[in-house]
Amino acid sequence: MKKFITLTSVLFAVLAMPAHAQFAKPEDAVKYRKASFTVMGAHFGRLGAMAGGKAPYDAKQAAENADVIAAVAKLPWAAFGEGTDKGDTRAKPEIWTESAKFKDAVDKNQAELAKVVAAAKTGNLDALKAAMGPAGASCKACHDSFRKD
Ligand code: ASC
């Protein structure tokens, strides 16, 4: 029982840690979020190619790209913790000085990407096309406000 209580308190302590504590160093968080944006962009781009007629529409591939986006789109946001505004990053200071606005932009992006994921899984190209525009716009809105050129 005592061991259980100890284990439980360790688990709660870990869950309660600020996000940045999940990374040994701020540079690791920066690398991690950039890597996750790269993966997200690659798979969003593949869906974009299909939606835009630059690649043949393949419902199975669309669903597979959507699965990757569903998993990866959640990842970068925990990697904007304290001390991660420096180094090899295009993150603008506004991410931290206007954090409510940043959170809104992130929430909007998550919501639009969830629609893309759902649309990609319908097997219907028109549904995918309809979801891609607003999702791309929500990527761009965040880049315009919170990413250096
Ligand atoms: C992409 C990608 C982005 C978005 C953005 C939309 O394919 O990598 O970051 O679309 O360019 O405006």
Image (cartoon, rainbow, N blue to C red):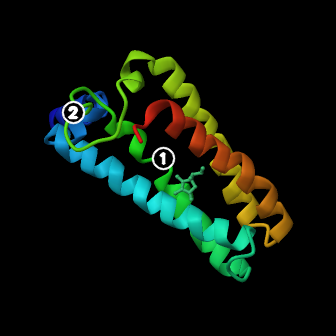
Q: Amino acid at mark 1?
A: Lys
Image coords of residue 99 (percent x, y): 44, 20
Q: Tell me where residue 13 sits by quadrant.
A: top left
Classed neighbour count for the residue bearing mark 2: other residues with Cα under 10 Å, few (<14), some (14–19), many (≥20): some
Asked whether 141 or 1 is in front, the reply is 141
Q: Is residue 21 left or right of residue 46?
A: left
The image position of residue 98, as x and y in percent, is 45, 17
Quadrant of the rendering where the C terminus is positioned: top left
Residue type beneath disc 2: Lys
Say whether residue 66 is left or right of residue 71: right
Q: Earlier in the sequence, mark 2 or mark 1?
A: 1
- The residue nearer to you, when weighing 74 against 135, is 135
As drawn, 70 above or below 148: below
Query: Looking at the image, can residue 67 be seen?
Result: no
Name the residue rendered at 77%, 63% in the picture: 128
Q: Position of residue 53 (x, y in %)?
A: 75, 75
- Ligand 1 occupies quarter: bottom right
Q: CA distance from mark 2 to mark 1?
A: 22 Å
Q: Which mark is residue 86?
A: 2
Q: Which mark is residue 138?
A: none
Where residue 30 sits, quadrant-wise, is top left
- Among all residues in the image, which is located at the extreme front? 149
Looking at the rendered image, the quarter that the N terminus falls into is top left
Specify whether tag 2 is near ligand 1 (CB below 8 Å). Answer: no
Element assignment for label 1:
loop
Q: Nearer the viewer, residue 50 or 117?
A: 50
Q: Secondary structure at mark 2?
A: loop
Residue visible at 26% across and 29% down in the picture: 17
For label 1, count other residues whose C-alpha is less than 10 Å away and answer few (under 14), some (14-19) or many (20+): few
Q: Which residue is mark 1?
A: 74
Q: Is residue 147 left or right of residue 144?
A: left
Q: Is residue 116 left or right of residue 20?
A: right
